[in-house]
Amino acid sequence: MMIPYKHEPFTDFTSNEHADAYQTALKQVKEQLGQEYPLIINGEKVTTEQKISSYNPAKKSELVGVVSKADQELAEKAMQAAHTAFGEWQYTPAEVRADILFKAAAIIRRRKHEFSAWLTFEAGKPWNEADADTAEAIDFLEYYGRQMLAIKDGQPVESRVGEFNRYDYIPLGVGVIISPWNFPFAIMAGTTVAAVVTGNTVLLKPASTTPVVAYKFIEVLEEAGLPAGVVNYIPGSGAEVGDYLVDHKHTRFISFTGSRDVGLRINQRASVVNEGQIWIKRVIAEMGGKDTIVVDKEADLELAAQSIVKSAFGFSGQKCSACSRVVIVDEVYDEVVARVEELTKALQVGNPEDPTNYTGPVIDEAAFNKITSYIEIGKEEGRLIAGGTADQSEGYFVQPTVFADVSPEARIMKEEIFGPVVAISKASNFEEAIAIANDTEYGLTGAVISKNRTNIEYARQRFHVGNLYFNRGCTGAIVGYQPFGGFNMSGTDSKAGGPDYLQLHMQAKTTSETL
Ligand code: NAD
């Protein structure tokens, strides 16, 4: 009997036993830093001359790993491998495919802290954030495995006397999976295995800043019994390899998670029918956010401030769900702002190997430059009450930064910064606060802190975001509990970790037999 799905618990690092285990994992992984990793095409290791070097963002001089880099020729080879492997894999029973996910989850669970330690080094994730990323990867494996078993015989349809009708889901074909660096394990693994468990074959192009953890995951899939060619690991340049694969006639679908601009570019390119292509490509695109916490006048103000600070500065604000805008109703504005200032100033910034540091680095120099330039814009647009400084001498560290008294029209209230910067606006009443919250082209997450039932129901209907939370922060969606995806320019609302997600990787086939 299959054990019902339950999400992977987070590790309690206040326990010495767990803290010691994490320290040990950090030491073990540190000894493995700097190694070389090949591409994996059709189960074969392919080493290239061109490389991608992955550095620790908290310590720029520390090389995490060197990964081979695919060019168009190798991308083509990988495409042929995936195309051929689809021939068999599409008919492999759903139970067999799901079993590989369950086995992979078991392997990762046994090596949980090791994987999280890789995330601490490669993505600069503090312990709890790395632990949550690994837990989410396990959740995707466990959840999608079960979802596949639930839909393997399709959905019920009616049959008249003398006929037998069936409605089954069949796979699509070769999928290109393009994943971001900010959940380098969970999103990379989740988008890959959703495609694989539904019978598709995959070309995985992980983000160039975090390719090592992706390689480690491919090793796990191999150990779990995934046949050669079903997942091909091809890190490479987005513009070179990404465009080539998006355009390819054999590409049946693209599952992208990343920024708005890249998502729109992929969507546009995928709409072009190329020579020899016989289908309309499907695009799953989960993109950026400009997520708001609204604070009502009847609210637990301490909860409000805590939720804002945690959602804004957890993993240095580098979550698509991160709180980057706050709208507070006039009557409680000053009190909440003062408490946010106090809590933010108490956050310790530094290398996440040390668990006393709450905020680690941002991912790379480009992110550092973008965030610090937005801080300069913020100084013109609002009142700086915390942070505002940055230092990249050792790693890419930006102090958690808060701007108050910002106009809803300001750039820092509208544009995704993707770093530890939050802008606060004042609203004269709750309705106006929701209107300001909605006044963005994005629509990913949001939260409302309120004790007023009428206002909660008002927000439930009118706060236009894919994931809306009441009386808590706006980050931390759990697979199978809070399916995740956004509206408008936040993407196609595919709802990762939800009951309809797998079907996006399949097409329905009706068969009707006359008896
Ligand atoms: P990004 O768009 O820069 O890169 C994402 C991936 O796309 C990377 O693998 C990159 O190499 C690849 N890429 C770049 N150019 C490409 C091209 N022309 N063709 C094909 N692929 C190409 O995003 P990022 O910086 O890695 O991630 C941060 C962004 O992701 C933020 O905007 C964040 O909000 C968003 N995000 C969204 C979600 C969600 O579920 N909605 C989750 C995580 C991150």
Image (cartoon, rainbow, N blue to C red):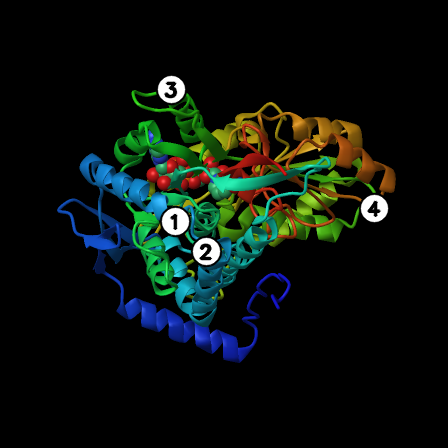
Tell me residue 272's x, y (percent). Answer: 38, 19
Q: Is mark 3 within 8 Å of ligand 1?
A: no
In the rendered image, the vertical position of residue 489 relative to residue 366, given as above or below: above
User: What is the C-alpha distance between the residues marked 4 and 2?
Assistant: 46 Å
User: What is the C-alpha distance between the residues marked 3 and 1?
Assistant: 27 Å
Q: Which residue is mark 3?
A: 272
Taking the spot 63% from the left edge, 45% from the top edge, the residue there is 474
Q: Which residue is mark 4?
A: 451
Sequence-wise, which precedes: disc 2 or disc 1? 1
Relative depth, front residue between 191 and 157 = 157
User: What is the C-alpha distance between the residues marked 2 and 1?
Assistant: 9 Å
* Pointer 3 with pointer 1, Cβ within 8 A: no
User: What is the C-alpha distance between the residues marked 4 and 3?
Assistant: 50 Å
Tell me the kind of residue under disc 2. Arg
Does dot 4 land on a helix, a strand or a loop?
loop
Mark toward the viewer: 4 or 3:
3
Q: Residues within 10 Å of mark 4 (few under 14, many from 20)?
A: some
Tell me the kind of residue under disc 4. Lys
Q: Which residue is mark 1?
A: 89
Tell me residue 403's x, y (percent). Answer: 57, 37
In the rendered image, the vertical position of residue 252 relative to residue 28, given as above or below: above
Mark toward the viewer: 3 or 2:
2
Q: Residues within 10 Å of mark 2 (few under 14, many from 20)?
A: many
Relative depth, front residue between 419 and 160 = 160
Q: Which residue is mark 2?
A: 97
